[in-house]
């Protein structure tokens, strides 16, 4: 019996190592090629670079207009994420506390909306945005907030069910207003899932290319994914500079994810148990 457990555990560990290698290999390959010249990349993408040359990073930094591009990405990502966490947690709180046919219908609509891909509504949405003069950064942030709300509300809704309503009732008896009850009692109790929702939104918004390419694809307002695409033209592709640019683009979100990884696991597991 003990031998079977050891074998089973060993197989699981080996499968996990293989799965990790499967996901890490493309990133490692990208990192290796970011130090190569264009000639070396064309000769072999798997071969190690002859010298660890940082010229690609210097050139990519200048051509990317990196500081301006990362500023635009941070504005969009941070603004939408903060608005998403606050608005969706409040919406989920109301839907959980006020159990009516209308609240159930609204939650059902949000649940169904998750299944609708952006590509299905892309053209009519852009047409309406054009009529409202919203083909700009505020319009991009508003649309991202709308598309990210469904999944966020579902996550908050499952977690919110086990926030003790007695605490809210006691605060209401003491004269606390509804906003004060939410921000001083409810929001601290759902910190785990709030951090999880924030991280998922950050990773999605930071890497988004399609919607920004349709709304803010102009010099000076482009985010990092848009600027990075400039290295891959129709007739020429600067794989060496593109690799360096992609590494610089993913480093901030990797650091953010590593720092908040424990909150993701905690929030998802607690949400699963409490839901």
Image: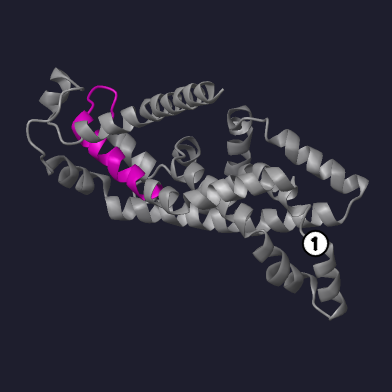
Residue 211, given in percent of the width and then of the height, sits at 50, 38
| Residue drawn at the location 28% of the way across and 32% of the way down | 28
Quarter of image, res 82: bottom right
Q: Quadrant of the N terminus?
A: top right
Q: Which residues are magenta?
A: 232-253
Q: Position of residue 129 (x, y in %)?
A: 59, 43
Q: Residue furthest bottom?
A: 174
- The residue that appears at 50% across and 22% down in the rendered structure is 3
- As for residue 197 lying within the magenta part, the answer is no
The quadrant in which residue 188 appears is bottom right
Q: Decide which of 152, 270 is in the foreground and name it.
A: 270
Toward which corner of the image does residue 34 lie, by quadrant?
top left
Q: Secondary structure at mark 1?
A: loop
Q: How many marks?
A: 1
User: Residue 196 vs residue 186: left or right?
Assistant: left
* Nearer to us in this view, 232 or 252: 252
Does the rendering let one see residue 158? yes
Horizontal arrangement in the rendering, residue 207 relative to residue 264 (left or right): left
Q: Is residue 196 left or right of residue 137?
A: right
């Amino acid at each position: 019996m003990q031998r079977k457990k050891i074998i089973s555990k060993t197989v699981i560990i080996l499968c996990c190592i293989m799965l990790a290698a499967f996901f890490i290999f493309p990133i490692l390959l990208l990192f290796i090629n970011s130090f190569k010249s264009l000639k070396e990349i064309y000769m072999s993408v798997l071969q190690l670079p002859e010298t660890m040359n940082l010229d690609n990073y210097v050139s990519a930094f200048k051509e990317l207009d990196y500081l301006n591009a990362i500023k635009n990405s941070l504005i969009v990502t941070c603004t939408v994420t903060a608005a998403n966490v606050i608005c969706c947690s409040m919406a989920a709180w109301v839907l959980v506390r006020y159990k009516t046919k209308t609240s159930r219908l609204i939650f059902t609509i949000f649940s169904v909306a998750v299944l609708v891909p952006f590509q299905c509504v892309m053209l009519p949405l852009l047409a309406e945005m054009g009529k409202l003069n919203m083909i700009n950064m505020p319009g991009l942030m508003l649309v991202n907030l709308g598309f990210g709300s469904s999944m966020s509300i579902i996550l908050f809704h499952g977690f919110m069910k086990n926030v003790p309503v007695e605490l809210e009732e006691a605060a209401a008896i003491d004269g606390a207003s509804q906003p004060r009850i939410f921000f001083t009692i409810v929001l601290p109790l759902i910190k785990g899932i709030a951090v999880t929702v924030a991280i998922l939104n950050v990773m999605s918004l930071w890497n988004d290319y399609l919607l920004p390419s349709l709304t803010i694809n102009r010099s000076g307002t482009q985010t990092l994914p848009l600027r990075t695409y400039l290295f891959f033209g129709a007739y020429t592709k600067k794989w060496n500079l593109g690799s360096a640019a992609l590494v610089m683009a993913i480093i901030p979100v990797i650091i953010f994810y590593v720092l908040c990884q424990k909150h993701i696991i905690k929030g998802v597991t607690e949400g699963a148990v409490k839901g």
